Image (spheres, rainbow, N blue to C red):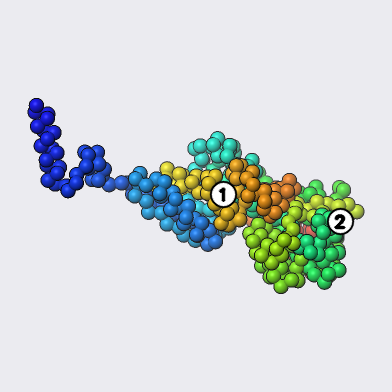
Amino acid sequence: MRKRIGGLLSCILCAAAFTGCGTAEETYLENTELPKVELVVWGAEEDEELMTRIIRSFQSNYQGEADFRISFEVQGESQCKDVLIGGLEEGADVFTFADDQLNTLAAAGALEPIENAEQIRDRNLSSTVEAVTVNNQLYAYPLTADNGYFLYYNKRYITDEQAETLDGILEAAASNGKLFTMDWSSAWYVYSFFGNTGLQVGLNDDGITNYCTWNRTDGDIRGIDVARAMLRIAESPGFASCTDEEFLKGVKDGSVIAGVSGVWNSVAVKEVWGDNTGAAKLPTYSCSGSQIQMASFSGCKLIGVNAYSEYPEWAARLAEWITDEENQRLRFEMRGQGPSNIAVADSAEIKQSPAINALLEQSVFSQLQRIGGKFWDPVSKFAENMAAGNPSGRDLQDQLDELAEGVSAR
């Protein structure tokens, strides 16, 4: 009886204190403050609309579990490593970065190993899993598998057969008074000529310095053979060394009918060339009496979680949310970026994308970009001189020796 009276009194007091008072559980929830979670996300400026949408869906999915304060800040992916290491405790909780920065970030203690590594492995393409792995540990979440390059060509001027060889492309371009372009000021693209020749470049065991045999004087393909091939290409009236921006400008003004670029230009190229848009793996090129398949560096974008985050569990949840199947599909729809998620990569939408298919075709002839910082300038200097036709007439072997010495410098 006492319990019944006590319960009745409790109800009366509740009714007096709160208009429309609900259950005791509801009253408890109303008076319980949710834990505050403040997260900062870094990403590319072009991703702001997409990331804002993804963040909102994350907050909606987990509403009632925390009082979220999640903000997006623009931070270039290529500079992410340097900015983050400059102040880890002040850096973003979750950030987008290029895969070639992973080793440095992991070594600096900026990233913690992923806890649900097996799930991440099962969901993503093997090449992207390799890109997030250091000493058999996963340190980031794969986001895209499209940081590479391939051939765009205008089918109005170049047939599919001509697009298979650089000789065919250059002939078609020259005969039509047009251009094929490639950026020889960027060592990233210049790797194409050396990558499938047996000449080697890569990281030493210290993870910082490089080895380089591009100046090799023996073997089926020597360094000087590649240099001579590049000079022959540069002599063609159908060739121009152009930056990525200049390539797109040429597409728009009609002077360029083929070029080496990536998926980031797929929408813009399609807008100009329409149904004549062709995309394929890189062509072969003539070198020492043979046709050599042009190689490429491959890479992907990753999502990392700052090891110094005040909210590591929620930061990890958000990173996984950004990279899950649904949001990688959304990323392709909104940004045209190729997914790392296996299910999305195998979808009908992806198979209908010429650019993504060309990139996947080229991936057979690509390798992950694992290069130390001394690689870039010596290669660019050499290639720019080849693009100019070696105007000083300097000995090619001397230039290759200088290149190899610079790339391998400690």
Q: In which quarter of the image is residue 268?
A: bottom right
Instruction: State the residue at coordinates (61%, 56%).
Output: 336
Quadrant hosting residue 172? bottom right
Q: Going 68% across and 62% down the picture, which residue do you hit?
A: 270
Q: Position of residue 291 (x, y in %)?
A: 86, 52
Which kind of residue does numbered mark 2 sit on?
Ser
Q: Which amino acid does label 1 sit on?
A: Arg
Residue 229, how many percent across, how many down?
85, 59
Residue sitting nearer the eye, 189 or 237: 237
Question: Which secondary structure lies at badge 1?
Answer: helix
User: Pointer 2: what residue?
Assistant: 286
Q: How many C-alpha atoms fall within 10 Å of the one at disc 1: few (<14), some, or many (≥20)?
A: many
Element class at badge 2 = strand
Instruction: Name above or below for residue 284 compared with residue 171.
Output: above
Report the front residue among 208 and 288.
288
Count of picture labels: 2
Q: In which quarter of the image is residue 8?
A: top left
Q: Is residue 334 left or right of residue 170?
A: left
Marks 1 and 2, the one that precedes in the sequence: 2
- Residue 219 in the figure: left or right of residue 83: right
Query: In the shown orientation, is residue 92 left or right of residue 353?
Result: left
Tell me if mark 2 has few (under 14), some (14-19) or many (20+) residues whose alpha carbon lies within 10 angstroms of its own.
Answer: some
Q: Which mark is residue 267?
A: none
Give the residue displayed 73% in from the left and 50% down from the top.
362
Task: Tell me what residue is drawn at x 39 percent, y 45 percent.
Answer: 62
Does residue 150 lie above or below 15 as drawn? Answer: below
Is 406 in front, or is 34?
Answer: 34
Residue beneath label 1, please? 329
Q: How far apart are marks 1 and 2 (CA)?
A: 39 Å
* Image location (x, y in percent) of residue 306: 47, 49
Q: Can residue 92 be seen in this view?
A: no
